[in-house]
Image (cartoon, rainbow, N blue to C red):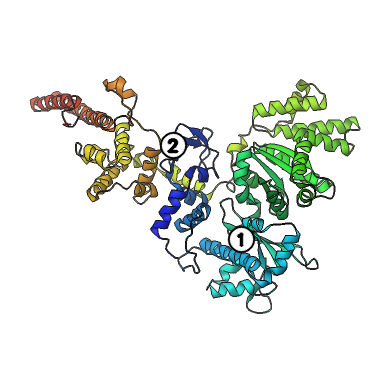
Amino acid sequence: MTKIPHDKIEEVRDLTDIVDVVSDYVRLKKRGSNFVGLCPFHAEKTPSFNVNPAMGIYKCFGCGVGGDIFSFVSEVESLSFPEVVRLLADRAGVTIPEQDEIDEEASETEAIYHALRFAARHFFQNLTQTDHGAEARDYLKNRGLTADTVKHFGLGYGINAWDDLLEATERSRMNPHIVEKSGLIIKRKERDGYYDRYRNRVIFPILSHVGKVLGFGARVIDPKDEPKYINSPETPVYTKSRVLYGLYQARQEIRAREEAVLVEGYTDVISLHQAGFTHAVATCGTALTPEQIHLISRYARRILLLYDADSAGVRAAFRAIDLILEKGLAAYAVALPEGEDPDSFVKRIGRTEFDAYLKDRRQDFVHFILTHAGRTGRMDTPEGQADVQRTILRSISRIPDPLVQESYLKLASDALDIPDMQLRKVLKGIGRGTRRNPRYEKTAAERPAAAIKIEKKRESLKINDRVEPLPEEKALLRLMLGKGLPLVEFILGHMALSEFSAGPGREMAEHLVSMYESGKIDRQAFIRGDLGDDLRRMAAELLTSDVEPSANWEIRRNIPVPKLDEDAVESAASAMMLLKLDRVDSAIGELKDEIFKVDRAGDDVRGLQKKMIDLHTLRRTIEERKFISDV
């Protein structure tokens, strides 16, 4: 695989906002200079996942994972380092030389992604830069799509030939088995060889929420062709139940509004975006799934369903509402006029009227159920009314937040004109048994494979396998990492490496000495994981949290507690003093035990007593900071 130049990697790092990227996976809230949220790598109810935008690093104090933006995306998406760099480069607008070939050492997944990315470029060029694409360009223009919209969604064209894409992949020396596994070509049954899956069709690339090409949808240009749509088969990288069309383009607006508009088709999404409703997404030929709702929940608190007024559309809306509520999101619905879809409707009435229509016809799920029941005559009999009431209460019972559930119960009470106490009795009778909050219960399919791998790794670790550095050691290491050469010289000029606890703390100090000798403290080497995962996690912890000398120091030792930003040298001196005192106190304790044993055995303890006097003298010297001449 073509090696990515180091300067390009650093350019991507400099231009990538770690908060923006992590927010695609975690709902972050600002806390001081950092951002916090629920860790994507393990189940938790209290946020312990921290992001430090100034340092460009993350750290979870619950499961211990940490690192920089590259390691985060690598772990959450299970991607190789080159894949992560290219993905973030696309996001940041950094041009990296394209790979025309992929070497034999690449994994099958990498090869499939490469084939899909190649195909997307090929289809786009067919549409925008060839004579073959003229008919498709006219078709899209007649559908009201602009050139900017075509580019924004990366639309393409599969020309009317059996082997156009096949020959292009062969010229790039791609393995036909990989191209077939990507869903791009089909193996012939009668004879050897393959043929293109997409022919004489407009192509809709299906992207992941981070912009990776996963598959394609294709629509006929000639109405005589059948079928009308051809979609990618499921592949090792594409499972349609876990993908939402348009989420990559919509995610920023969804986050800003805290709401997603959910529709059914590719063209519905594209037309709504072009009209200014850039928070629209669509399922990829499936009913809404829990995995898709989980994707939306990274950005939104509410989902607005745009559904057809026919019976099939209403059934789909009912099912979607219950799933949405179960995942802790709010569900609203808007019925479109009969015979309309979002694509045709927004084009016919325009942006302003469409926006007004959404606001006027928007219903919470309680009133949606009641309105539909009234239209279908279910409220005409006492039995029907009771059935509708139970339907509403069953939906309310799915809401995991008791406060939100209570609010909807009161809303239902008003809408049904039934005392809430009466409804509450029925609600309790419905009961779903004891269940944990679904917002914190992610299925294996909803969570990245890396999260499961990390949890298994944590479970297998024994507590004695790692020696946790003392608080004062962490303060010293943070100072050296943060302040660089001057603090390394000051601290390690007054301490021996052996004074650091054996394990990652001492190992980090040893690397800092080596870096000092080379004339440069390379923090990124720790954060990238170049020096091992243990040091990467520790560096992320030290640089993410505002580690300062413990407030207990003043209580325990009568040591002033300066802020690090005010006086780094004074902070280092205090930390060194406390660490040295801990070591001396430990030695005093061990010597006391030895004196007791020797004395009980009737042996001479005068030599040991002299050592004890020396240790107490050393302790006074440390308390007076005589080990430091600079302070």
- Residue matched to label 1: 235
Residue 361 is situated, as x and y percent measured from the top left of the image, at 79, 38
Nearest the eye: 514 or 347? 347
Residue at left offset 81%, top offset 23%: 418
Nearest the eye: 272 or 528? 272
Q: Which mark is residue 329?
A: none
Residue type at mark 1: give it. Thr
Q: Residue furthest right?
A: 380
Element carrying mark 2: loop
- Residue matched to label 2: 61
Whether residue 183 appears in this view of the structure is no
Answer above or below: position of 615 versus 346: above
Q: Which quarter of the picture shows residue 327? A: top right
Left or right: 543, with 396 as reference point: left
Q: Earlier in the sequence, mark 2 or mark 1?
A: 2
Residue type at mark 2: give it. Phe
